[in-house]
Amino acid sequence: MSKLVLGAAALLFASTAGASAAAESLTLQQARAIVAPLYDALNEPLKKDIPGLLARAANADYKSCSTNQDCLGRDELAGQFKVFGTIIPDLHWTVKDIWTSGDQIVVRGEASGTPVQPLFGVKPTGKSFRTISIDMFTVRDGKLASAYHVENWAAAMQQISQ
């Protein structure tokens, strides 16, 4: 009898834990709303209130990491967005696909623009680029807590130099 009770208790715990995790999983609609201000800040950044948009999207202790060790805080990231806006005034960053799993959001994006200043050492040629990005975010309290991101800047540099 005790094995039956333990088995039933384990089954009940497993089913309620699963239901709780499913209830806490972000919907695509929630994910899109959470990341929207960040991507808005990446569209013609010099025309935007970047710090304000990032404050809407991300927690104050947000970290944006381009490697496993190299991370920028929210204020540093705002400065980086401004630099990109200076180099690429017509920068556009489009969300192409979005996935969620629990408190994680993964975005496949596309960056495009025409540099007017050197981009990673490549002088402007008047040519535009279009490249892919992958961003993996963790959400805490309805805002972005961290990001790991990769962009194919090598492809962008190749496109503008040919």
Image: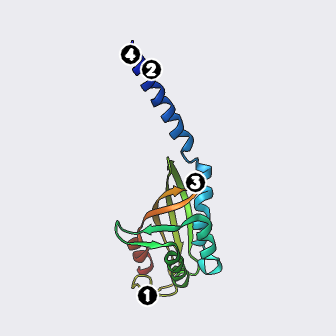
Q: Which residue is mark 1?
A: 123
Q: Amino acid at mark 4?
A: Ser
Percent coordinates x, y for residue 100 in the rendering: 51, 49
Q: Which residue is mark 4?
A: 2
Q: Earlier in the sequence, mark 4 or mark 1?
A: 4
Q: Amino acid at mark 2?
A: Ala
Percent coordinates x, y for residue 7 in the rendering: 40, 20
Give whichever of 48, 90 is nearer the camera: 48
Q: CA distance from mark 3 to mark 4?
A: 44 Å
Q: Comparing marks 1 and 3, which lies closer to the viewer? A: 3
Secondary element under disc 2, as helix, strand or loop, is helix
Is there CB contact under 8 Å for labels 4 and 1?
A: no
Q: Which residue is mark 3?
A: 31
Secondary element under disc 1, as helix, strand or loop, is loop
Q: Which residue is mark 2?
A: 8
Q: Earlier in the sequence, mark 2 or mark 4?
A: 4
Q: Amino acid at mark 3?
A: Ala
Q: Residues within 10 Å of mark 4 (few under 14, many from 20)?
A: few
The image quadrant that residue 44 belongs to is bottom right
